[in-house]
Amino acid sequence: MPLIGAHMSIAGGYYKAVEAAAEVDMNVVQLFCKNNNQWRAKAITDKDVSLFQDALAKHNVDAPLCHASYLINLASPKAELWEKSVEGLKIEMLRCERLGIPNLVFHPGAHMEATLEEGIERIIQAIDELHQQLPDCPVTLLLETTAGQGSSIGHKFEHLQAILEGVKQGERVAVCLDTCHIFAAGYPISEEKDFKATFEDFNKLIGFDKLRAIHLNDSKKDLGSRVDRHDHIGEGKIGVEAFRHMLNDRRFKKIPMYLETPKGEENGVLYDAKNLATLRSLIK
């Protein structure tokens, strides 16, 4: 069975995200390890850790993935924000280590008034700094593909390739691919021939050995719109066939996949359960 889950709320405790995933028969889960809209974070207690780990074991939920704060911008040309971002990501790496979460996904950042090349160099510098400060931290940083809004970096596979090749300890960095983001960035994946071509490009520039997680999202906006708006599986501009291709491609078989589709319910059925059922119906 493919590893499919969703981003779940940590309201009431980290273990609550695991329980929520298990309630809709998911076998992996993504969560925040702190309030994603604040820099500050309260300490993680021994009880927090034990409840979280116990819930993972009890419900057979694997591959917990942490998503870093949206405030972090490692590409910022502004020294104060860059330093705050490095410290912020360091805190999140340590929180992941405390909770036993192996991977931490983050948006590479926006270069703002600086050039793209300068932004990429800032990201490389930041990651090298983090690795130097945390030489023994087992948490792998995952660069997320982006839609390309504003001056965000990561909407071209070449951007991530440059970062991966530029970081001194490249083995400590990998990639999280978001289906909505790459589609909005201009990579077609709906038709089988386009899907094959896009992932041949991905494999050539980044490599499947660097793909550690996938965000499964349809897109409310058109191909190449560079606008990040998630939609339910099969209800957006990508359409259901792209997800059929992915779920039946052996290259993705062991890579955990996480829904980040809109929350809520319809006629008493959670949207997460509906999206999960749609995905599982596509598996041959």
Image (cartoon, rainbow, N blue to C red):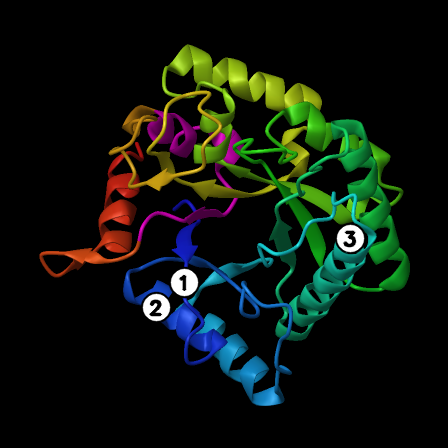
Q: Hey, what amino acid is under mark 1?
A: Met
- Where residue 202 appears, x then y in whole percent? 61, 23
Residue bearing mark 1: 8
Mark nearer the N terminus (1 vs 3): 1
User: 241 or 161: which is nearer to us?
Assistant: 161
Q: Are marks 3 and 2 in contact (CB under 8 Å)?
A: no
Question: Which mark is in front, 1 or 3?
Answer: 3
Image quadrant holding the C terminus, namely top left
Query: Disc 3 marks which amino acid?
Result: Trp
Q: Nearer the viewer, mark 3 or mark 2?
A: 3
Position of residue 140 in the picture relative to residue 218 (left or right): right
Q: Which residue position is annotated with label 3?
A: 82
Q: Is residue 250 magenta?
A: yes
Q: Nearer the viewer, mark 1 or mark 2?
A: 1
Q: Position of residue 122 (x, y in %)?
A: 82, 42
The local crowd at label 1, few if under 14, some if 14 to 19, many if 20 or more residues have their Cα within 10 Å, is many
At x 45%, y 26%, the residue is: 183
Q: Is residue 45 above or below residue 4?
A: below
Identify residue for label 2: 20
Q: Residue at x 83, y 36 (%)?
A: 121
- The amino acid type, in three-letter code, at marker 2 is Ala
Q: Earlier in the sequence, mark 3 or mark 2?
A: 2
Residue 246 part of the magenta-drawn span: yes
Q: Secondary structure at mark 2?
A: helix
119, above or below 245, in the image: below
CB atoms of marks 1 and 2 within 8 Å:
yes
Location of residue 70 by image quarter: bottom right
Q: Which residues are magenta?
A: 242-262
Indicate left or right for 76 with 61 as reference.
right
Between the residue at mark 3 and the residue at mark 2, the CA separation in whole angstroms equals 35 Å
User: How many residues crowd around disc 3 within 10 Å: few (fewer than 14), some, or many (20 or more)?
Assistant: many
Q: Secondary structure at mark 3?
A: helix
